[in-house]
Image (cartoon, helix red, strand yellow):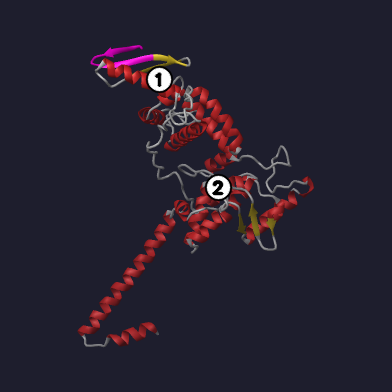
């Protein structure tokens, strides 16, 4: 029995399966401390429930390897790549610690410290965004949830840690003037990809993977067979302009015998993978201010659809959302729509004031209000 005092409190320290265990008993009485140490050893050897030997939590960096191996088998490549990227950051902060040693306070410290770091390969002085930190926290939560399924005796320290709020400009809607400038400066195939997104609200990767066989020009619809949810796998109507655009692209690549509307320039049997570089260049030449991502064209479609009279359930079906709550996050009335709404309100208010003043004037002169009302109806 290795117990010792720190001030008035007794601590114990021993090695178990090569790992050093050093903890406070919380007791000032040595006998009670010895019993506490004995119980801790018994719990580690014997889980009580079914007399199953405890599965000790590994070091963080060792568990990262186990988690990523599992993620590679279970998740889509894009999700796995995100977890892999986040684990590099998490390993810097929590490496060297055992999985069950990491506390909520440590996660809070990580959250604050990470937010103060400068972004790599970005403009000078630009800090890591709250969204980036949130993604790392989501990976950390997933790691601990899976650790419990693996049988490790751990408590998820990320539970209860508040996420950073999305900044007001995290999702934006471009104006028609910005759209015209952007499209006129966008190279191909970016320009056509952007037009598809603006007319359908499809996600960028959904547009990249449009297959010729999934386009029905008779019914004027695109079938999207991909997605994490059932709602994402949907049929999307096409505008006349979009149908003409897609017909033109199919004819253009007909000799290449590619199954994709937007094939990779390096391999026509695969879809294009990214247009980020072309997008950044087009946005810069068009002098679009502020944060502007290709994905914002999806938000632009959603906002314009609502402004044109689309109801939320219909819009949710078009966007491939499983809930209307998610759809509501995509609707951002732009300055133009806000101005139009205020102008309508102003006209409505003015008409009401004029009508009230007219009625009051007629009453003062003894004129019946029925005549005015009938005249207005006619």
- Where residue 182 is drawn, which disc sits there? 2
Q: Position of residue 194 (x, y in %)?
A: 59, 49
Q: Position of residue 13 (x, y in %)?
A: 37, 14
Q: Residue at x 52, y 43 (%)?
A: 293
Q: Nearer the viewer, residue 333 or 215?
A: 215
| Residue 121 in view of the camera | no
Q: Is residue 158 above or below residue 329?
A: above
Q: Is residue 18 left or right of residue 377?
A: right
Magenta-tinted stretch: 1-13
Quarter of the rendering occupied by the N terminus: top left
Which image quarter: residue 263? top right
Q: Nearer the viewer, residue 375 or 46?
A: 46
Q: Which residue is mark 1?
A: 41
How many residues crowd mark 2 within 10 Å: few (<14), some (14–19), many (20+)? many
As drawn, the residue found furthest toward the right would be 255
Q: Is residue 318 left or right of residue 140?
A: right
| Residue 140 in view of the camera | yes
Q: Is residue 144 above or below residue 229?
A: above
Q: Residue at x 62, y 48 (%)?
A: 226
Mark 1–mark 2 distance (CA, rounded to whole Å): 67 Å
Q: Position of residue 330 (x, y in %)?
A: 47, 51
Secondary element at tag 1: helix
Dominant secondary structure, magenta = strand
Quarter of the rendering occupied by the C terminus: bottom left
Total numbered badges shown on the rendered structure: 2
Secondary element at tag 2: helix
């Amino acid at each position: 029995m290795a117990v010792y005092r720190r001030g008035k409190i007794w601590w114990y320290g021993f090695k178990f399966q090569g790992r050093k265990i050093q903890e406070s008993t919380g007791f000032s009485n040595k006998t009670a401390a010895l019993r506490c140490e004995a119980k801790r050893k018994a719990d580690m050897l014997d889980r009580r429930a079914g007399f199953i030997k405890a599965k000790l939590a590994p070091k963080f960096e060792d568990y990262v390897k186990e988690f990523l191996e599992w993620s590679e088998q279970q998740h889509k490549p894009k999700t796995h790549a995100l977890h892999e990227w986040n684990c590099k950051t998490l390993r810097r902060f929590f490496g060297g610690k055992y999985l069950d040693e990491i506390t909520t306070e440590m996660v809070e410290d990580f959250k604050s410290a990470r937010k103060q770091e400068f972004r790599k390969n970005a403009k000078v002085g630009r800090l890591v965004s709250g969204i980036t930190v949130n993604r790392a926290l989501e990976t950390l939560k997933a790691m601990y949830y899976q650790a419990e399924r693996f049988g490790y005796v751990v408590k998820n320290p990320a539970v209860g840690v508040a996420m950073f709020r999305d900044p007001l400009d995290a999702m934006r809607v471009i104006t028609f003037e910005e759209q015209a400038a952007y499209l006129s400066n966008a190279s191909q195939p970016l320009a056509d990809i952007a037009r598809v997104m603006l007319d359908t609200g499809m996600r960028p990767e959904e547009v990249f993977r449009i297959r010729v066989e999934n386009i029905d020009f008779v019914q004027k619809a695109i079938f999207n067979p991909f997605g994490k949810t059932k709602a994402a796998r949907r049929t999307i109507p096409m505008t006349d302009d979009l149908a003409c655009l897609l017909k033109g692209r199919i004819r253009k690549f007909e000799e290449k015998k590619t199954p994709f509307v937007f094939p990779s320039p390096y391999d026509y049997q695969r879809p294009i993978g990214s247009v980020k570089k072309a997008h950044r260049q087009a946005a810069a030449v068009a002098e679009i201010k502020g944060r502007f991502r290709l994905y914002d064209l999806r938000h632009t479609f959603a906002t314009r659809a609502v402004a044109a009279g689309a109801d939320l359930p219909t819009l949710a079906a078009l966007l491939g959302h499983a809930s209307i709550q998610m759809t509501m996050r995509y609707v951002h009335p732009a300055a133009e729509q806000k101005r139009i709404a205020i102008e309508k309100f102003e006209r409505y208010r003015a008409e009401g004031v004029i009508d009230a003043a007219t009625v009051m004037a007629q009453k003062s002169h003894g004129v019946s209000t029925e005549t005015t009302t009938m005249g207005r109806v006619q």
